[in-house]
Amino acid sequence: MKEILIDLLGNEILVYTLMALVPLVWVVLFALFAVWWERKVSAHMQDRLGPMRTGWHGWAQSIADTLKLMQKEDIIPAAADRALFILAPYIVFTASYAAFAAIPFSAAYLGAEINLGLFYIIAVSSMVVVGLLMAGWASNNKWSLLGALRSAAQIVSYEVPVALSLLAVVMVTGTFDLQEINRMQSGSILNWLIFAKFPLLLAAFLIYFLGSLAEVNRTPFDIPEAESELVAGYHTEYGGMRFAFLYFAEYANMFAVSAIAASLFFGGWNSPFGEFLSGPVWGAVWFLGKGVFFIFVQMWFRWTLPRLRVDQLMYVGWKVLTPFAFALILAVGAWMLAVR
Amino acid sequence: MQATDLRAEEAVGRPATVPGLGRPLRSEEMVVNMGPQHPSTHGVLRLELVMDGEIVVDVIPHIGYLHRCFEKHAEQMANYQQVIPYADRLDYVAAMSNERGYVIAVEKLLKIQVPERVEYIRVIMAEFSRIVSHLIAIGTYGMDIGAWTPFLYCMRDREHVLDIFERTCGARLLYNYMWVGGLSHDVTPDFQEKVRAFCTYFRPNIKELNDLLSYNKIFIERTANVGVLPAEVAVNYAVSGPTLRGSGVKWDLRKNDPYSVYPLLDFEIPVGRGEKGTAGDCWDRYMVRVREMEQSVNIIEQAVERLPAGDVRAAVPKRIRPEAGDVYVRTETPKGELGYYVVSDGTASPFRVKVKSPCFVNLSALPAMCRGAMIADVVAALGSIDIVLGEVDR
């Protein structure tokens, strides 16, 4: 896609800017849709209707909400650390969005063709913690601080099993390049990595999925923003556009982890029917569809399960998922040695 | 978990040391105000939490944000009946139970006997309000633990009871239904049918609630062994209601100090047995409520079968002017032992109405449950004693 655009426009900088903007457009549209969708999903799970007033079944609700948030007064608490307070939402969003550079949306589109794509994603997405800590500290609110510290502890802990489970995939595929991993899974549905070394990579997927729920602060690991305990966690003091940015980053992050799950385990942009309905455009459709499906699973969890306590969360992270992830790597390694 | 106690010792006792620093690291406790505007304090309660990191060193409840001078109002009323709507507003999620205690007290002062039909309807209404109150307690408790959906399922079932209340007396929350000597309205002709329909509808929903929430692994992890209130401590704090029974003490005024027609009805008193952890933990208190709802359905079914005919206003006195004297009446409301001490000086309005509020007493046991626990456990413990600030502050 990049080569075609360079031929067409003749200006490399313009092309790179365009390429960088494609995921942003998607993320904006997706966040607007997902906020509305989450409200509808939760409503129907809970025997109610959800937003119904703004358009057909309230489809324009998140647009209205965004407009409202944009018009709100920009409040910065008097005792807050102004610079950090202003900076934090952008850092959180930038870190979340940076991950999209290495996510292959289709066979023809990948923001940055770096051969360490997966490694890059793991690296940049941990930058989110910095932003969250800044937000919690700068708010000068005890609840925010507790929320931020919880987030930091949680995200750092869960990066370990997540990275280890992704490492299992890398061992099987032998590459960090997501586009390459996607290509390997083409052909038949049985080539999807979830079936590779069955059931080892299935286990890797489960560890990854649980860990990613914790990384994006979703139930049952939504402890940093546990409404019933910490009011709203690190974003208690945020309002208006800054709040919208934090929220936006959260949904971007949700999509990023779902997209990685789709890419690494469920064939990415490959059609489940082999060659049927495949190609660059259909590829994007499949990829986004798979990503959105995992978002739905996240929502499903959220509206079904209660929340763990902080120490139980650490227990699950360090004493359950991490040892299992290590055992998994060992098992994958043993299999590879034995088969060779 | 025994670990909670160990953590508490660590929190209070030793200062943390850093290797190589050569001196203990200075640390101090942080005071956090939880409330009065906080999603989990169930109203305008302020908890002053003394925290050591995430661990609670002490909890100091501050109350009074919803003080409405109920007792003073009661003295200023023109007559005894005017107190009833104020009694509704004590524990506003179970208004029927509150007004019932008050009217029984005044009837005792007047030494009047109410018709049997009135007694039965009052029992049905009081048990319905127990179901409503427990549904809210259970639903919001799920929300405190982080599960949103059971709350809305509970609210859905609650609507059905409120519909029955509305058909009977026109109000859904604050009824002014029980009068001294009788009731404001007789029940509608299809009352029995509606009540039976509700009982058949509601029983499977209790099972659904158990499947969704009570036996959920995460829910058990969060509530079992948390906020343990041993039986002895519970008795010493004089707590009552499900909070007491959750600790394994079989004490229910409907059995132990029977009033109304309860001796004629067949029901059981569920108590906490420490099934998932220690006796007297949050899960036990929660489960006592679930089981009490089942028992309430049993009571309602029996009462509605035996509902005798009669006039619900037959015994309502024209003029209420009791002889000088005093009376203390205690009834088992959803929250516990609600007592009314009514003093009459022989005039048309009460000289003094003192309320012994179960929520107030139960709240006093909160610090004993929370010391050494984590901040999330405070929320769990507070939810499990099910306070309504309208009754704590009066």
Image: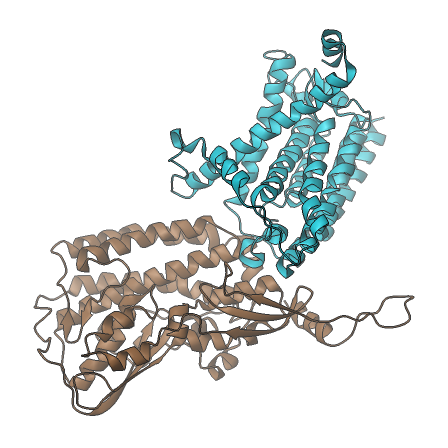
Chain colours: A cyan, B brown
Position in image of residue B379 (x %, y %): 54, 63
Q: How many marks?
A: 0
Residue B186, given in percent of the width and then of the height, sits at: 12, 63
B308 to B360, vertically: above or below:
above
Residue B166 position within the rendered picture, expressed as x and y whole percent measured from the top left: 22, 56
Is residue B123 something one can see in this rendering?
A: yes
x and y percent of residue B235 in the render? 47, 82
Of the pair B103 and B275, the residue shown nearer to us = B103
Q: Which residue occupies 36% across, 65% down?
A: B292
Say which of B48 and B238 sits in front: B48
Q: Vertically, is B340 above or below A114?
A: below
* Left or right: B163, with B387 as reference point: left
Q: Find residue B139 and report its image quarter.
A: bottom left
Query: In this picture, is B208 found above or below A120?
Result: below
Quadrant of the drawing holding the N terminus of chain A: top right
Q: Does A84 sit above or below residue A293?
A: below
Between A152 and A134, which is closer to the camera in this rendering? A134
In-front residue for pair B141/B15: B15
Residue A158 seen from this side? no
Left-right relation of A22 to B139? right
> Residue A192's quadrant in the figure?
top right
User: Going 27% across and 56% down the picture, which residue do you hit?
Assistant: B162
Q: Please give the name of the residue rendered at 85% of the width and 26% of the height, measured from the top-left corner.
A: A340
